[in-house]
Image (spheres, rainbow, N blue to C red):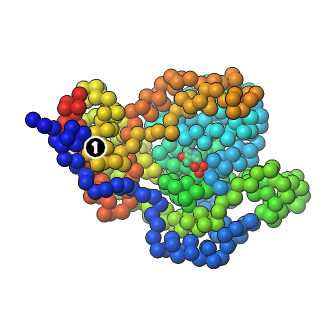
Amino acid sequence: MTSTLALLGGQPTITAAGPHFTWPPIDDTTRAKVAAQLEEAISVPGRSGIVAELEDGLQAYFGVRHAVTTSSGTAALHAGYWAAGIKPGDEVIVPAWTFHATASPLFHLRAVPVLCETGPDGNIDPNRIEELITPRSRAVMVTHLWGKPADMTDIVAVAGAHDLIMLEDGSHAHGASIAGQRVGTFGLASAFSLNGPKPLSGGEGGFVLTDDDDTYHRVITFAHYNKRAKSEIPNGQPLARYAVTGAGLKLRIHPIAAAIAHDQLARLDGYLAERAEIARYLNSRLARIPGLEVTEMPEGVVPSWYGLTLTYRPDVLGGLPIERFHAALIAEGATEFDRPGSTCPMNQLPLYQQPGPLFPGHPHSHRRYRAGDFPVAEYAHAHTIKLPVWHREQDLELAEQYVRAAVKISDHHKELL
Ligand SMILES: *Cc1c(COP(=O)(O)O)cnc(C)c1O
C-alpha cells in the first residue's frame, strides 16, 4: 500500500500556491499615503512632516516622552547602546538566543556581549543573570522572542538590585504587554525594528523609545547629526556643540518607510486582536497533536504573535527527526511551517566564537563562545517549529488546512521512520 503522505507520493493537504502569508498588509489607503508622501517630501532632515507624525504616534501608542526613528532596528540598537553610555570594555548581558543584531552593535562600541542562558521559550532566564555579573557589567538587554514578553518583573528586579541599566529589544513584540504595560517601556530605553515581517513594519526602519531627556539627546547626537541635532538639542546642553557632526553617523529613516509605518501603526491594535483570535484557534487544535507542544502564555501576558512556536517532541513520534517531520509538512503544501534559521543561539555564530578577525583587539577574549555552551537555548532552538499568525477572518480556513497537514503527519509518522 502506498502512503497518503505527500512526502511519500500521496496527495498534498494544501494545493493553493504559496506564499500563504505576506506582511505587512498593503491596501489602497497605504498606497494613497505613499503617493501623497512622494509629492510632499522624499527627504526629511529634521523632526518634521511624516517623521514627526510617526514619532508623535509612537509616543502616544507607547506612552513615552520620546520616540526617535532610525534607518533600521540594528541602527536603533546601536544608537540605544551608545545613548545609554555603554563604553569600551563594558559588559552587557544579553539573551543567548535572539537575532544577533540585539547584541552585535556592541562590537562597534568595543563593549562585550555576555550571553545568558534562556528558558525553553527562548527568553532570557532571570535566574541565570546574577552569575554573569562582574564589576564591568553595565546593562541587561532583553528580547521578547517571537513576540512573547520576557519575564520583566524578575529581570527588572535583578537589574535594579545590581544597578544595571535595563534595555529592551522589542523588534518581535510591538504592542505586546505584561499586565497592561507595553514592552519597550520597562527600562531606560528600548529599540524596535520596522523591517519587513515585523509586527509593525515600514519595510525598513526602526526606532528608539525613552522617557529620559538626556538619553533622547544622545540618540539624536548618535543618529541624527546636523539639522535635527541643531533644532532638538537645547543650547547649554553639553552635546549641543557637537550638533553639526553628531558622533559621525547618520541613521535616518526614509520618509516613504515612515509613511508606511505610520499607516500601519493606526492598524496595529486591530492586527494584534485579530491575530490573537487565529492564534487561539491554532493553539487549541495544535495542542492535541501528538509530537507537538504549544507555548503557554502566563496570566496577564499579551504577545504580538510575531511567531506561534511549537516544541517538537521526537520521543513521542518514535524518534522521528524534526528535519523529516518538517520536510513532510512542506511536502503537504504547509510551506509556512518554519524552523528558525538565522535567529539562533549566538554562541553558534562565528562573530561570537571568534570576533578577532573582524574586530582586532576587541576585549571579548575573556568571553569566547562555542556550540554547546547554552544547552537550554540550543535544545529549544533545535526543536522549534513555528508559524506566522494570520489576521484576517478568511485566513481561518488556511489555518485549518495547516492544522490538518500536521495531524496527518503525526497520525502517519510511522511511515516516515
Ligand atoms: C529584525 C531584528 C533586529 C534588526 O532589525 P533590522 O531592522 O532588520 O535592522 C534586531 N533584533 C531583533 C530581535 C530582530 O528581530
Position of residue 285 relative to residue 275, above or below, is above
Amino acid type of the residue that numbered disc 1 sits on in the rendered structure: Ala
Question: Where's residue 51, x and y in %?
Answer: 66, 66
Residue drawn 39% across and 33% down?
Answer: 383
Residue drawn 56% across and 63% down?
Answer: 261
Question: Where's residue 47, x and y in %?
Answer: 72, 66
Q: Is residue 78 left or right of residue 404?
A: right
Image quadrant in which the C terminus is located? top left
Q: Is residue 250 left or right of residue 72?
A: right
Residue drawn 66% across and 50% down?
Answer: 76
Q: Is residue 192 visible?
A: no
In the displayed image of the protein, which residue is found farthest to the left? Answer: 1
Question: Where's residue 333, x and y in %?
Answer: 29, 48
Q: Name which quarter of the figure residue 393 lies in.
A: bottom left
Image quadrant in which the N terminus is located? top left
Q: Name which quarter of the figure residue 293 lies in.
A: top left
Q: Name which quarter of the figure residue 353 lies in.
A: top right
Q: Which residue is mark 1?
A: 331
Residue drawn 84% across and 57% down?
Answer: 243
Count of numbered badges drawn on the protein: 1
Q: Nearer the viewer, residue 308 or 406?
A: 406
Position of residue 100 relative to residue 373, above or below, is below
**Quick one: SS at disc 1?**
helix
Question: Where's residue 151, x and y in %?
Answer: 52, 40
Q: Nearer the viewer, residue 174 or 247?
A: 247
Q: Is residue 246 visible?
A: yes
Q: Is residue 40 left or right of residue 19?
A: right
Position of residue 377 relative to residue 337, above or below, is above
Within 8 Å of ligand 1, the CB of disc 1?
A: no
